[in-house]
Image (tube, rainbow, N blue to C red):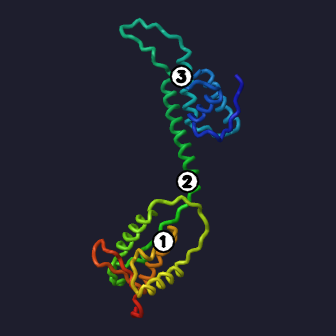
Amino acid sequence: MTGINFKVEAFEGPLDLLLQLIQQLEIDIYDIPMADITDQYLEYIHLMKEMELDVASEYLVMAATLLAIKSKMLLPKQELEVDFEFDDSVDPRDELVEKLMEYKRFKEAAKQLKEKESERNFYFGKAPMDLGEYDMSGKQANLDVSLNDMLGAFHKMLRRKKLSQPLHTRITKQEISIDQRMNDVMDRIEATRGRVVFEDLFDAATKDDLIVTFLAVLELMKRRQISVEQSGSFAALYVFSRGEEEL
């Protein structure tokens, strides 16, 4: 049988090499011709030695295993005249086939995971933001609502606007200034005589605009330019201008 050329660095272990041999020789993995596969395997080992490459011990162990199976396959069946029945139905190749099939399953699973990783690389997400500096629940803030109340109200508003699920859209570069949005919020509050319903501030068309508006409200609260009040649990939130109140 003619030899097969291999890239030495292509194999991750003896089982990987055996699978490649089986594929190259178009062999039925459940009916492996041990003489042919062993000769090809040993040829690869000799090639590694000729190239002065270190042959890993696992390759040598597999070579010994193949030779042992080959020897068992070549030995004639003996008719044993003993008191017990000799089970000759066990194929010496069964254990090797089982290992090959298990390795093949793991290799295919790894390939699928690699493909999913490649697909995931085409998705880009915004990194989580640290909102700790906007936490107004402490004594310094002296507000009637906490950051958790604000986040809860914002989330409910998103659900009502049917924006809680990710939107399928094309990514475009768009500059949204928080400072400009802060001015817009203050203008909106002043236009309603210093008091506006929290949800009325969010009339933007996109989810990004809504998030920027929310961050602008938090920043204004941090600077104590506005205050947010709630008369009771589950009641509406109202945003007030603090006017000329000293900081």
At label 1, the amino acid type is Leu
Secondary structure of the residue carrying tag 1 is: helix
Q: Is residue 166 left or right of residue 83?
A: right
Q: Quadrant of residue 174?
A: bottom right
Q: Which residue has dot 3 on it?
A: 69
Front residue (pair 19, 13): 19
Q: Position of residue 58 (x, y in %)?
A: 55, 36
- Split into 4 quadrants, where in the image is the N terminus? top right
Q: Position of residue 134 (x, y in %)?
A: 42, 77
Labels 1 and 3: the sequence-earlier one: 3
Front label number (2 vs 1): 1
Q: CA distance from mark 1 to mark 3?
A: 70 Å
Q: Which residue has dot 1 on it?
A: 210
The residue sitting at the front extreme is 192
Q: Position of residue 221 (x, y in %)?
A: 41, 82
Q: Which residue has dot 2 on it?
A: 120
Residue 28, placed above or below residue 85: below
* Residue located at (65% from left, 26% from top): 25
Q: Are marks 1 and 3 in contact (CB under 8 Å)?
A: no
Residue 93, placed above or below residue 199: above
Q: CA distance from mark 2 to mark 1?
A: 27 Å
Residue 139, placed above or below residue 44: below
Secondary structure of the residue carrying tag 2 is: helix
